Image: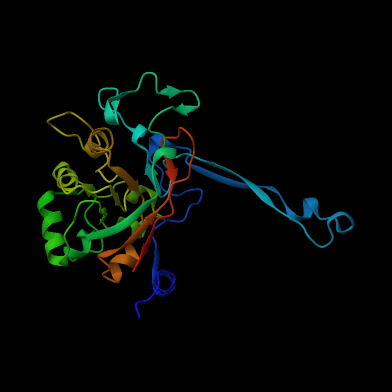
Amino acid sequence: MNPSLPDLLRSAKVYDLEQPRFHGMPIHPVHRPGYFYALHRRHRDVYDPKQHGPRSSASGVLTLMEHSGTHIDALCHQACELTMFGGVPVEGAETPAGFTQLGIETVPPLLGRGVLLDVAGWKGLARLPSVYSISADELQQCAAAQEVEVQAGDVLLVRTGFGAIWNKEEEYLEAAGVAKSGTLWAAERGVVAVGADNMAWDVTGERDPETGATLFAHVYLLPKKGIYIMENLNLEELAKNRCYTFAFIGIPLKFTGATGSPLRPLALV
């Protein structure tokens, strides 16, 4: 008898691909202050045995930028010449309360086949050099070495190795990333989303000499191709166990009109 879906889920190993969130974690300069959490009500503040019996409660205040920690970009996050995906102009869609189109609430749950290309591991490195650009040829060669093929509908994850130094902001912000050719290679394969263990998928600060664009993937994948970008993933355990294909689950929060959302991505093997 074939195992049922609940049986398969119970027997699967789950890899948590989210980095821990804390004050002082790496934050891109344009997204500061980033993250802050503080207790607002403490147990001792409300402890009253006469009114509530032995029960007490605590709660806190959470302040964070959409693009802090492990997160996913909405299609409204980026525009090319003030035009977003599907030819939607920025003007008329932007409001003080967020976007009327292409906000994070329109991003469907990402449920499908995930593929990890462990570029750092393929090169025999703990992590790639700082600000190193991963080319299309390197992605292709890494896939061949791992005996995997990136297919239409996949979620493509690329490991640089920088996820292992999440607690070292200065070094982490100088992470390697995917070059323009690598971004084009991923898009040509029809992936629905990409993600990496760095701040931007791209190499931060790199400028495309043809278009003049910084963060080329952000001006190409989001507004041109409708391909989502996930950032600040933790791919260390997945790579250590050489799990190159898996079931991927990533579900953003429905912040109406927001340009991004915290993400709890999972890999099931």
Farthest residue, direction front:
1
- Residue 190, position as x, y percentages in the image: 20, 47
- Residue 172, position as x, y percentages in the image: 34, 50
- Of the pair 10 and 237, the residue shown nearer to us: 10
- Of the pair 111 and 136, the residue shown nearer to us: 111
Could you tell me which quadrant the C terminus lies in?
bottom left
Task: Give above or below for 213 relative to 112.
Answer: above
Q: Is residue 230 visible?
A: yes
Q: Name the residue at 37% across, 76% down.
A: 3
Looking at the image, what colour scheme do you see? rainbow
Q: Name the residue at 14% across, 47% down.
A: 185
Farthest residue, direction bottom:
1
- Residue 217, position as x, y percentages in the image: 23, 39
Q: Is residue 234 visible?
A: no
- Residue 71, position as x, y percentages in the image: 40, 47
Could you tell me which quadrant the N terminus lies in?
bottom left
Count of number-bearing discs: 0
Task: Give above or below for 249 relative to 241.
Answer: above
Tell me: 152 left or right of 19: left
Res 62 quadrant in image? top right
Task: Give above or below for 54 relative to 176.
Answer: below
Q: Name the residue at 18% across, 28% down.
A: 212
Farthest residue, direction top:
91
Res 82 quadrant in image? top left
